[in-house]
Amino acid sequence: GSSMRRRGAGKVVAVKVPKPGVERELMADLTAMRRAAEMCDALGLELGFDSASILREYEVQVPLEFDFEREAAVMDTAARSLLKGPPASVYSHLSKTGAHWLGSCTIPRIVPPLCTPCCIVMEWAEGQAMTEAAKWGDPSTLPPPAECRRVVTALLQALGQQIFVDRCFHSDPHPGNIIMNTRTGELTLLDFGQSKAISPEECERIAWLIMAVAGRCDETVASAAADAGVVLSKVGKKKTNKKAGAGGSKVDEASKGSKAAPRMSVPVLSAREEKKLKRRQSKKRGKKGRRGDAGDAAGDGDEDEEQEEAAQSAGSDI
């Protein structure tokens, strides 16, 4: 869709209307891309990620972008949620870590009497889109580092609340959909046509996946991604090159001539959390393939292990 600025009765508003023919063209492009991905899968061509399932998800989500009534309802719910703020438990956790809730990210409120199935009228957001405020690839146009950290933190907090509290989130937060008001420091999220509602179970799987990525454990990432329905190939495999030098050592080509990426001093996934994740995933697989007494014994073993772990961790802060 496209938006325009309108003034009436002393109030400036933004009006979003669909562009003619865009939906038909976009769906045709997505269908062609999905068929190409399925052909690659049939021919055994590995792209390193599950492209076919991603494109199938897009085919489901993209038509929702042209449902303006749904978008207006999602915007209204998300705006009220951000205005209210996160649950008290979030504030408590932030205070323990020395951080705080910024609350500087907002969503334009809609004007319900003026909205129709083909038109959304909303408050006008003052400021510049991120694409205009800073040029891609030109560090000289970026704000100071402290301001960059503030902006990123505010956006992550707002998106985190949408994903883990509201369970309905903006799924297309590219720089053109983020308005920066340099005078007030306020950030505004636009265009909720691409938004995704998830179940509590999906929310939990996303949480495990994020912790696995933050912990930088390739095998755990692949396992958590598979649990979330995404298949990754060649995860954790590194190409090596045998050298004829002393000791016949192997040299990692990926690290040759470059410094290793810094790792977190404290892993996000502890050994106990990672073990719990793997046990949980093995239980799901066991439910499908468990047969006879052997399967029952395995299940009992998992329960005994959980009880032992609970006894060992009694009184600890998880």
Image (cartoon, rainbow, N blue to C red):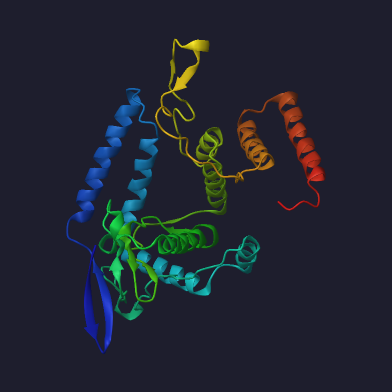
Residue 97 occupies quadrant: bottom right
Seen in the picture, residue 198 relative to 84 is either above or below; the reply is above
Residue closest to the eye, 198 or 155:
155
Q: How far across and how far down the image is residue 211, in percent?
A: 56, 46
Q: How far across and how far down the image is residue 191, in percent?
A: 33, 63
Residue extending farthest bottom: 9
Residue 130 seen in the figure? yes
Residue 308 occupies quadrant: top right
Residue 75 occupies quadrant: bottom left
Q: Kindly identify the residue that appears in the image at 53 percent across and 53 percent down.
A: 199
Seen in the picture, residue 138 relative to 294 is either above or below; the reply is below
Seen in the picture, residue 300 relative to 243 is either above or below; the reply is below
In the picture, measured across the screen, residue 208 lies left or right of residue 119, that is right
Q: How far across and how far down the image is residue 228, in percent?
A: 51, 42
Q: How far across and how far down the image is residue 93, in percent?
A: 63, 62
Quadrant (top left/top right/bottom left/bottom right) for the N terminus? bottom left
In the picture, measured across the screen, residue 160 lies left or right of residue 96, that is left
Residue 66 seen in the figure? no
In the picture, measured across the screen, residue 270 lies left or right of residue 313, that is left
Residue extending farthest left: 20
Residue extending farthest front: 246
